[in-house]
């Protein structure tokens, strides 16, 4: 039986059981609010020399901002980071960065978040460093954190590695992967069976206390074709054989032993188009099992492999993994973020986004933006997608310097503005051509620590951040979700 036929049979059986069907035809009402620029030039966290919060910090632009709670702190992992105001014209000396905030010092996200960054002697934000077997790995452009979590002892980062895993005579592919036609390892059971599998580094902070939040040691290199773009959450209890007993709230945080379960949802590519790579896969792993000895971590996840008699089936074999969502009927799908929202008694997934110009050429697309789904369990049934946030509808396009997103063809923004990626800028002099680049949303992340009940029954207020590309920064948003 071919994989595609096997997948269709599982899908039909699940639909017949009513377990992958949408929860309801009714969408949640969403009321969105922009709070602040979280990180980037002019940001609340002090990313210019005049900041009162973190004076002289050199951090002029960054993206992503993947959050998790680690004991008494909020940790946020950021992507490619500019520590120079002319980084657009010269390669910055550092790369990914990390911010942290102590709970008790700032517990009110409506007043933005007081993130602090480690600085070097020159006031530049220190980069994240990832080591494997004592050797620091190159984490240049587009090699970034993917997601992160805490086991209550150490902070963990899931980092990108080699984008293609080579194979050939005498060089077999790891695990269940096959050697493809171009001498790269592929996952024949993924929704992109000819696409190259890639490395993802399961890494953790050194030492039992996990105090050094910008240094990570690789404990397992995960070669996968299904969890290339991923998001992770930790939950209190998870029972394969009795889903009704699962407790999806966060494990207790403090200085105790590791308890709880890791959930990870993944997609087989960084960016997806409708009906291709937007399939969503699921794995789980006991948090205590990740600690291991001083050597490699015991990375032995269990993969969602479909439904049988209405109950989820799990497998040790990644080749058995089947999507919890497939055949996504939206345009571009980039990052996704999933969190348990107690007041809704549901998981909430925010996802979507757009690639920058020239991959996206229409800034005012009414069908593009951040979408929302909900589900009672990690595997579903996931509701139909609804467009929760659209840049044009929310009035996000504005001029310099106050626009959340900058428009194309200037819009009051100088062609040489250092905080624009500047698709057609020519350094060091401005290009004679118009700057067609414009802001797009991506890198959505739910700050689950601050989720709270909404003003009405069956409602919730969630806080989330997105990257804006142009200008190159991360902004904090707030949404109240209400059941109609």
Image (cartoon, rainbow, N blue to C red):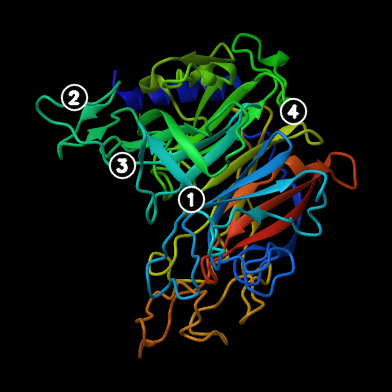
Q: Residue 162, labelled with which disc?
A: 3
Determine contact: label 3, label 2, CB under 8 Å: no
Determine contact: label 1, label 4, CB under 8 Å: no
Residue 404 picture location, percent across and down: 64, 70
Q: Which residue is mark 1?
A: 334
Q: Nearer the viewer, residue 102 or 368?
A: 102
- The Cα–Cα distance between marks 3 and 2, rounded to whole angstroms, is 16 Å
Determine contact: label 2, label 4, CB under 8 Å: no
Q: Which residue is mark 4?
A: 254
Which of the 4 image quarters holds residue 197? top left
- The Cα–Cα distance between marks 1 and 4, rounded to whole angstroms, is 33 Å
Which of the 4 image quarters holds residue 202? top left
Residue 200 appearing in the image: yes
Local secondary structure at mark 1:
loop
Q: In the rendered view, does 206 fall on the left or right side of 25?
A: left
Residue at far top of view: 241
Q: Tell which circle, 1 or 3, labels the residue nearer the N-terminal end.
A: 3
Q: Tell which circle, 2 or 4, labels the residue nearer the N-terminal end.
A: 2
């Amino acid at each position: 039986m071919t994989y595609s036929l096997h997948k269709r049979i599982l899908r039909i059986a699940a639909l017949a059981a009513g377990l992958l069907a949408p929860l309801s035809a009714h969408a949640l009402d969403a009321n969105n609010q922009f709070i602040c620029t979280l990180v980037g030039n002019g940001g609340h966290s002090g990313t210019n020399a005049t900041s009162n919060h973190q004076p002289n910090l050199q951090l002029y632009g960054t993206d992503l901002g993947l959050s998790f709670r680690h004991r008494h702190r909020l940790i946020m992992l950021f992507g490619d980071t500019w520590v120079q105001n002319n980084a657009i014209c010269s390669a910055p000396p550092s790369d990914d960065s990390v911010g942290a905030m102590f709970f008790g010092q700032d517990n009110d996200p409506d007043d933005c978040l007081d993130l602090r960054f480690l600085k070097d002697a020159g006031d530049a934000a220190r980069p994240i460093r990832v080591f494997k077997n004592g050797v620091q790995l190159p984490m240049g452009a587009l090699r970034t954190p993917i997601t992160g979590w805490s086991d209550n002892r150490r902070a963990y980062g899931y980092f990108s590695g080699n984008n293609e895993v080579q194979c050939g005579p005498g060089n077999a592919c790891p695990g269940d992967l096959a050697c493809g036609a171009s001498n790269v390892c592929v996952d024949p059971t993924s929704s992109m069976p000819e696409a190259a599998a890639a490395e993802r580094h399961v890494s953790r902070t050194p030492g039992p206390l996990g105090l050094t939040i910008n240094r990570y040691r690789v404990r397992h290199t995960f070669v996968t074709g299904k969890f290339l773009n991923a998001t992770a959450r930790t939950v209190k209890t998870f029972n394969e054989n009795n889903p009704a007993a699962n407790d999806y709230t966060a494990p207790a945080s403090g200085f105790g032993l590791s308890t709880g379960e890791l959930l990870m949802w993944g997609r087989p590519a960084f960016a997806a188009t409708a009906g291709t790579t937007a399939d969503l896969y699921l794995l789980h792993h006991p948090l205590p099992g990740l600690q291991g000895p001083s050597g490699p971590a015991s990375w032995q996840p269990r993969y969602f492999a479909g439904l049988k008699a209405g109950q989820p089936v799990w497998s040790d074999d990644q080749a058995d993994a089947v999507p919890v969502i497939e055949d996504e009927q939206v345009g571009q799908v980039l990052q996704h973020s999933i969190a348990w929202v107690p007041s809704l008694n549901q998981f909430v997934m925010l996802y979507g986004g757009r690639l920058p110009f020239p991959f996206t050429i229409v800034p005012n697309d009414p069908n593009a933006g951040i979408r929302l789904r909900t589900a009672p369990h990690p595997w579903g049934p996931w509701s139909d997608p609804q467009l929760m946030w659209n840049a044009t509808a929310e009035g996000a396009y504005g001029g310099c310097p106050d626009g959340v997103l900058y428009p194309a063809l200037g819009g009051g923004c100088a062609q040489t503005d250092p905080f624009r990626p500047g698709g057609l800028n020519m350094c060091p002099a401005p290009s004679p051509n118009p700057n067609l680049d414009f802001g797009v949303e991506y890198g959505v992340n739910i700050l689950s620590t601050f989720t709270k009940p909404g003003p009405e029954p069956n409602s919730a207020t969630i806080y989330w951040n997105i990257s804006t590309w142009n200008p190159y920064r991360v902004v904090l948003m707030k949404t109240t979700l209400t059941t109609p």
